[in-house]
Amino acid sequence: MKQSQIRNFCIIAHIDHGKSTLADRFIQRAKIIAEREFKDQILDSMDIERERGITIKSQAVSLPYTGEDGTAYELNLVDTPGHVDFSYEVSRAISSCDGALLLVDATQGVEAQTVSNLYLATDHDLEIIPVINKIDLAAADIERAKEEIESDLGLDAESAVSISAKTGEGVPELLEVLVKQIPAPSGVVDAPLRALIFDSHYDPYRGVIVHLRVFDGSLRPGDEILVWSSRARHKVEETGQFRIVLVETDELHAGDVGYMIAGIKTISDIRVGDTITTAVNPCAEPLPGFRDVKPVVFSSIYPVDANDYDELAVAMDKLKLNDASLVYEKDSSAALGFGFRCGFLGMLHLEVVQERIEREFNLSIVLTAPSVKYQVTLTDGTEIDVDNPEIYPDPGTIDSAQEPYIRADILTPSVYLGNVMALCLEKRGIQQNMHYLDERRVQIVYEMPLTEVLFDFYDKLKTVSRGYASFDYEIIDYRPTVLVKLDILVNGKPLDALSQLVFRENAAGRARQICRRLKEEIPRHQFKIPLQGAVGSTIIARETINALRKDVTAKCYGGDISRKRKLLEKQKKGKKRMKLVGNVEVPQSAFLSALKSDDV
């Protein structure tokens, strides 16, 4: 198809504003799948996406469309995630597009992630079409949504298209606006090949299937390609387009979005954001924007059964291919054996990876307490990065420590402002700005430690605002902090999987919380089990699991009391001896429970 008839676009919005539902309506109108095979959220291929109602992986689909004037178009849609943890997926998807549909919920208006995604699209010079969704709901306020688009986003509200992605109302009009306003891709077919990798997935029979957008040149089966960052060479076996299923084509040329199969088995050869060119006639420079993803949350993953380690290693390799944001290396623990130290974009990303390992690879795993990366300066002037309590240096050798800070951008109805501010202060937040967008909504900006938003900040924010507040953040710098290593002792022995690096003033509360949860989860033994939280040699929290007591005096029906005392004394000595040699089995559920917040 001619370049003038191709439109490459994405749908961006805050989480739960209807991106996947709108994609469903586009696919139904294109009739590329039989009605009996259609299902809601058809681009969300993972069960976890359907259950949570969120998009995690960017997906692409090519849709045929005939305009009102009879012109045939090819619409290449890239669906994008909305959660802040997956902003890298959004940026890669946006890089492969020429325009964007910016969805605004008619009932909720402009939210934090809407603004963030707008800036991202503007940075890539995309043509932006504002779309007001959910106009079929009784609570929809279209005029207020238009006012917010005008005032908060700086877009022309008169050009906004009002639709209901659920019922299909306004979707035909939106498609006409789309083909008229979003520009056709620019690119030179005769130039050396330049193609952007925006995603990939693994096929057990064909290897890596690379998702790409061709900016210049053309790509055909039989071509020898060069992956820019790794300099790896591969021979193309197949090219094609996404029509829900993979449809083979003779070539991909400038402007096309499609896939490539080249028998790639080495996972490290393919990285999202990289450039592909031909080995014979390579391009002069790669496409801009490629960067290695920097994780902000760290945790270790171990198999429950040590014999499953090899299977876990294979699972991590395959997940890494499908999730460019996952970073990991080998690790070991005295309590849990061999595993992997992983880096994640945030807590939702961690939960998604955990569930995918358990579901897709049928493995039972344990995760250690999440941590961030601290910068520690030793007394001899050496600076080290610490993200694992196991490598935390002796406190006597530490001169100072710094922790990462974020700038949190929160939009909330003004009626909940007090609750939100109290929550931010509780999380050591420092208010930087407050701006009333109108009489109903206020935008506040806080700077706070990243570690404070790891566990439960997002959930608590939704609780105190009854679900109306929205939250976006970016990491800004490192600032001084007072760190301590919190150890959890079970029967006097440290449980390294539950060790944490925490702010000193939060250590006692965190220790009490973990000890309470362990007491609920660890079964009673034949002897008393002390559960203690310690900083160095100082015990700062304690719970006790009482012993199971066998009634050794049951057979005494009378006689002298000294007989009963003798039996009880014998039992007491046995329990004392058992406490010295007995092992406490900590179930997997105890590890998982100890890492949850009090509100979960």
Image (tube, rainbow, N blue to C red):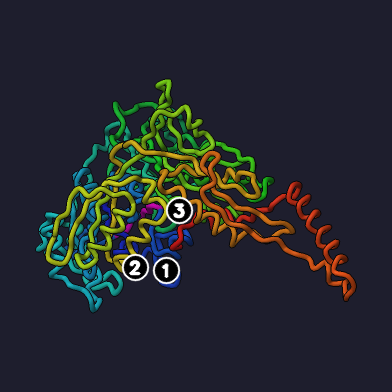
Q: Earlier in the sequence, mark 2 or mark 1?
A: 2
Quarter assignment of residue 502: top left
Q: CA distance from mark 2 to mark 1?
A: 8 Å
Task: Please tell me how many numbered marks the rendered image carries.
Answer: 3
Quarter assignment of residue 187: top left
- Residue pushed farthest right? 559
- Would you say 65 lies left or right of 376 here? left
Q: CA distance from mark 1 to mark 3?
A: 50 Å
Q: Which residues are magenta?
A: 57-64
* Residues at discs 2 and 1 in contact (Cβ within 8 Å): yes
Residue 340 % position (x, y): 55, 41
Q: Secondary structure at mark 3?
A: helix
Q: Which circle marks residue 38 in the picture?
A: 1
* Residues at discs 1 and 3 in contact (Cβ within 8 Å): no
Q: Amino acid at mark 3?
A: Gly
Q: Which residue is mark 3?
A: 509
Residue 254 % position (x, y): 28, 41
Q: Amino acid at mark 2?
A: Gln
Q: Secondary structure at mark 2?
A: helix
Between 546 and 219, the residue placed more toward the observer is: 546
- The dominant secondary structure in magenta is strand
Q: Secondary structure at mark 1?
A: loop
Q: Which residue is mark 2?
A: 28
> Which residue is depicted at the point 45% across and 29% down?
232
- Would you say 441 lies left or right of 550 here? left
Between 367 and 15, the residue placed more toward the observer is: 367
Between 399 and 104, the residue placed more toward the observer is: 399
